[in-house]
Image (cartoon, grey):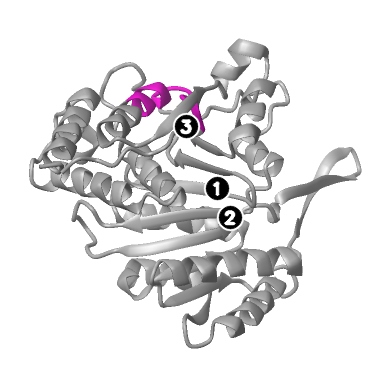
Amino acid sequence: MRDKVQPHIPATLIPGDGIGPEVVEATVKVLGALGAPFAWDIQQAGMAGVAQSGDPLPPETLASIRKHGLALKGPLTTPVGGGFRSSNVRLREEFQLYANVRPALTILPGRFEDIDIVLVRENLGGFYVAHEYYIPIGDDPRAVAVSTGTNTREGSKRIARFAFDYAVRNGRKNITVVHKANILKALTGIFLEAAREVAAEYEGRVTMNDMIVDACAMQLVLNPQKFDMLLCTNLFGDILSDQIAGLVGGLGMAPGANIGSECAIFEAVHGSAPDIAGKGVANPVSLMLAACMMLDHVDLPDLAQRLRDAISATLNIDQVRTGDLKGSATTEQFTDAIVRRIIASRA
C-alpha cells in the first residue's frame, strides 16, 4: 500500500535539554518512516536557548512558534537562579495555551490494565497565576506566605467547552469534573458552575458528573477503569495528570499537548533526565505518542494510528524495550524496531 503524498506542514521543532535531542531525533526518524509531512524549523529553548542567546526562550524560537502555530518539543530545563521562570509556563502564557490534554492509555500491561483516560486541564488560571507575597511580623520579613489563585467564569467555560467538544469528536461519553468546592467554594466553585452550564449544551451526547479531588485521587487507584475523561483546574490537573501516567507505566509512556486558539505545542511530559543524557538509553515513547497527538491535530488520524500500532507491536509482540521498561534495547535499537514495524504495515 503506497502512502498518499501529503502537502508539507511547517512546524517548529525544539530538541530541548538532557535526553531531549535523543528522543526528538528518534521521533523525527519514525515520523519520516511514516511519511508524515512535517517540514521542521529547528529552534532552541531551555539551557540550549540560554547558551545561544542568554534566554531559555529566545526571540527566534517564539517567532517560529508564532509563525507556524504548531510545535513539537523535547523536555526543557529551567536554569536555577538568575530569575528565570519555567519555560513551559512562559510558553503557555505567551501563546495563551489554555488547554492541556494528557491521555493515559495502557499500551504495555502492568499493574493496571485497560486504562483509557483523557485528562483536560485548564492551563492559565488557578494557583498557577502565582499572586504571592509575604507578610512581615516582628523581625521576620517572611513570617506569613500568601498565595492567591484566580479562575474566571469565561476561562472556566472555555476549557469546559473544549473538553466537551473533545469528547464529542473522540467518542467519549462521560466527563468527571474535579474540584474542591466544599472548601475552595469560590475558586473551584465557579469552575464547577461553569462546567455545569456548558454540560447542559451537550445533553444527550456527553454526560457529566463531579468529584472532590481527594476522592478522585483515591478512586483512580481503586477503580481507574470507571473514568473516561477528567476536567480539572490547573493545580489539580497538574497533580492528577502525573497520577494517571503512573497507571500506564510512568511519564515515559505519557504524551501531552498544550492547545490555544491559534497555536498547539506537543511535548514529552517527563523531565530532561540529565543523568542519562548521551548514554543512548532514553525511552522515546512519550514524545512519539505526543507526535501521534500532533498528527491527529492536523487531521492525519490514519498516520497517528499506524504509529500507535507500531509502538504497541514493538513493545508487546517484538518485546523490544528500553531499560526503564525492563528491556535492554538502546534508544536507537528501539527506534529502528518501530521503523521496521511501520515499513511492514505498508505491505
Amino acid type, label 3: Pro
Q: Which mark is residue 258?
A: 1
Q: Earlier in the sequence, mark 1 or mark 2?
A: 2
| Nearest to N terminus: mark 2 or mark 3 | 3
At x 61%, y 23%, the residue is 79
Dividing the picture into quarters, in which one does residue 171 lie? Answer: bottom left
Three-letter code for the amino acid on which mark 1 is drawn: Asn
- Of callouts 3 and 1, which one flags the residue occurring earlier in the amino acid sequence? 3
Name the side, left or right, on which 108 lies relative to 184. left
Between 116 and 147, which is closer to the camera in this rendering? 116
Give the class, few, some or many, for how many residues have Cα within 10 Å of label 3's Cα (few <14, many ≥20).
many
Disc 3 to disc 1, how far (Cα)? 14 Å
Q: Is residue 21 magenta?
A: yes
Left or right: 165 with respect to 308? right
Q: Is residue 287 above or below residue 332?
A: below
Q: Are marks 1 and 2 in contact (CB under 8 Å)?
A: yes
